[in-house]
Amino acid sequence: MRAFAHLLERLAFTPARNAKLRLLRHYLEQTPDPDRGYALAALTGDLKLRAVTPGLLRGLMADRIDAQLFALSYDFVGDLAETIALLWQGEGDDDVPLRDAVSLLRDTGRAALPGAIAAMLDRLGPSERLAFLKLATGNMRVGLSARMARIALAEMGAPEVKDIEEIWHGLTPPYLPLFDWIAGGPRPEQAARAPFRPVMLSTPTDLDQLRALDPADHVAEWKWDGIRVQAINDDGTRRLYSRTGEDLGNAFPDLLEALNFDGTLDGELLVRRSDAVCSFGDLQQRLNRKAVSRALLDSHPAALRVYDAMIWQGTDLRDRPWQDRRALLEAADFGSDRIDLSPLLPFATWDDLAALRADPPDPVIEGVMIKRRDSLYVGGRPRGPWFKWKRDPMVVDAVMLYAQRGHGKRSGFYSDFTFGLWDGADLVPVGKAYFGFTDEELRQLDRFVRQNTVDRFGPVRAVAPLLVLEVAFEGLNASARHKSGVAMRFPRISRIRWDKPAAEADRLDSLKALIP
């Protein structure tokens, strides 16, 4: 556990990408099995353990420390796991194997879990306690993506990143066959049917960048505001994955039933009533559910709009050019009216495409996708073959109302901001944003919060309604769950309007008028 704790600390405070890769590679090379495999799974989000809730952890602290002291400490530190690790009154300093911590969190029953966690915390020092609590809550936050972890693996041996990614979702922790392969052993057999394959992603572009390219070499299609998915029927085994490999099948049994083809398709998950594509808000009502009622299946029917084919009728198409894959799809029978092919857009010049992008036929469209006709299907984000040209974001001027401390490296700053718009003479909260600003702007915002606090609610501060924030967002839906009646998609702070009086911020009616 000590080596794992040290790795997490070094990763969290090492900004450089290549330095992070070296740290992880060194750990994986020096740490024995199965600990290194469990650490790798924890860092990539693939370690499935019993959920340890913040309420359980707060309950443990209530038995050990004064409630007011804990509240003040949590407000100062800003991170629950770190606060507990520092305050826990234990004098242990055992180097517990990581596999023992994993076993405790995976196998202990619900009733016995609080006592087992407390006993483990008693055995550990502060750094190891923090690592254990991060493991328990699933909150790594060390600036290391799953792809970076697989790059570090590839640097350890002969397999390339693309080869590791091809079989990754068929493996399970602690990945003993994977490490044997990296050391020169045989390639692991994929354990699962209908495995997820790495999805090909696009890079952002704009009209100025496109002018350097020949439009005759490219095609374009609408970019729909849904969820990118991979739909598979592998000899009767059907799967629906998100672009990161999360299994979505439980939430979309109706679409699984409609996968009456033989192959692996890349497309957009949508809610579609007849020929009308519904808003992202409708799709959200189906996401992250373990089961779906018949009423919701009937009112929010799922559909797949196909972008590309990876495998079709037993043939891997990824090393064939896009135009060949497209010709196959145009001749294919998908076996269900819930699946259709994304149409191509007619354009001869980039200005033609710009005109189409500026006036899409459906409010659910969020831009255009542009692809080279000869592009192969390459997992990851290769620069050049595919581009996304998203529509310009919507923007409102809102007033900062509340601020909360961030987590990790931001735990010393107020970095999560709730903002509101005018509704009559009142300011009504409409959203929350925690990115879009520079480090220097973060320091300025933090200083403003501290100097203009008017009330406190635990870790949250209410601030005087003085500062206007320009908030950009990608979409807007009506929402009965929010007091304002609206829900923004991907809000971020695009500009701090130090120059604008709060009285001149936008009104709620103006925002509601933007709802499709």
Image (cartoon, grey):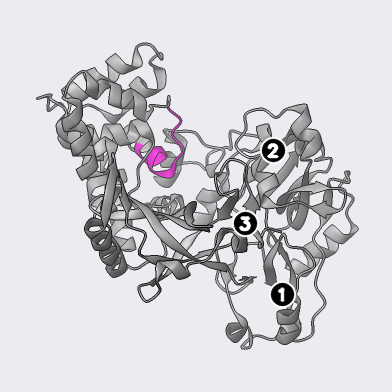
Q: Amino acid at mark 1?
A: Arg
Q: Which of the marked residues, 1 or 3, is nearer the chain's N terminus?
A: 1
Determine whether label 3 and label 2 are within 8 Å by CB. Answer: no
Residue at 24% from the left image edge and 20% from the top image edge: 118
Name the amino acid type tagged 2.
Arg
Side of 231 relative to 382 (left or right): right
In the rendered image, the quadrant that contains the C terminus is bottom right
Residue 253: image quadrant is: top right
312 versus 210 height, above or below: above
The residue where tag 1 is placed is 357
- Is residue 95 left or right of 8 when viewed as pictured? left
Which element type, helix, strand or loop, lies under badge 1? helix
Residue corresponding to mark 3:
476
Q: Residue at x 87, y 48 (%)?
A: 274
The first of marks 3 and 2 along the sequence is 2
| Front residue of 316 and 150 | 150
Query: How far apart in space, not on screen, are marks 1 and 2 (Cα)?
Result: 33 Å
Work out whether 173 lies above or below 508.
Answer: above
- The image position of residue 148, as x and y in percent, is 41, 55
Which stretch did the figure color magenta?
Answer: 39-49
SS at circle 2 = strand
Q: Which mark is residue 239?
A: 2
Q: Quadrant of residue 241?
A: top right
Type of amino acid at the residue the image marks with label 3: Leu
Q: Position of residue 37 (x, y in %)?
A: 38, 36
